[in-house]
Amino acid sequence: GEAVVPVANCDVKEYNSNPKEQLPFKEYVEYWREYIRNGYRSSRGCLYLKDWHLSRSGLIPKARGLGIAFPEQDAYTTPVYFSSDWLNEYWDAVAVDDYRFVYMGPKG
């Protein structure tokens, strides 16, 4: 619950994108529950957890500050239908970045 995650406000557009803020995961889950209880409305807008590197490897410096919560755990396995994960094969080899993200949020 203490992991810091990137959250986008889907009700706001800035340069053809949604602005993001960093929130503790626990706070985001509380927001999401409240959003549902309020009939899928909130004064904060529709917030969506987007681009969270849950499983990025620990090879990247200062990983905790980048929304990478658990680099020491193997939390991600490529589904068999996408096993030819050529983009991540490259990034894993050069140990610079990855394209494994978590997305979650309320409907709407």
Image (cartoon, rainbow, N blue to C red):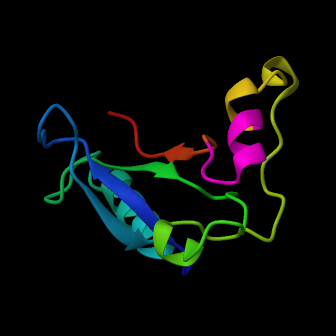
Residue 102 point in image, percent of width and height: 57, 47
Taking 56 as reference, is 44 left or right?
A: left
Q: Residue at 46% of width from left, 65% of height from top?
A: 5
Compare residues 20 and 46 and report the one nearer the observer.
20
Taking 75 as reference, is 50 left or right?
A: left
> Is residue 54 found inside the magenta-colored segment of the image?
no
* Vertical arrangement, residue 85 with respect to residue 69, above or below: above
Compare residues 31 and 49 and report the one nearer the observer.
49
Of all residues shown, which one is farthest toward the right?
80
Compare residues 99 and 26 and report the one nearer the observer.
99
Taking 89 as reference, is 99 left or right?
A: left
Residue 95 point in image, percent of width and height: 70, 54
Taking 100 as reference, is 16 left or right?
A: left
Q: Residue at 82% of width from left, 18% of height from top?
A: 81
Residue 24 point in image, percent of width and height: 44, 75
Q: Mostly what secondary structure, the magenta segment? A: helix
Residue 92 point in image, percent of width and height: 75, 46
Q: Which residues are magenta?
A: 89-98
Of all residues shown, which one is farthest toward the bottom?
2
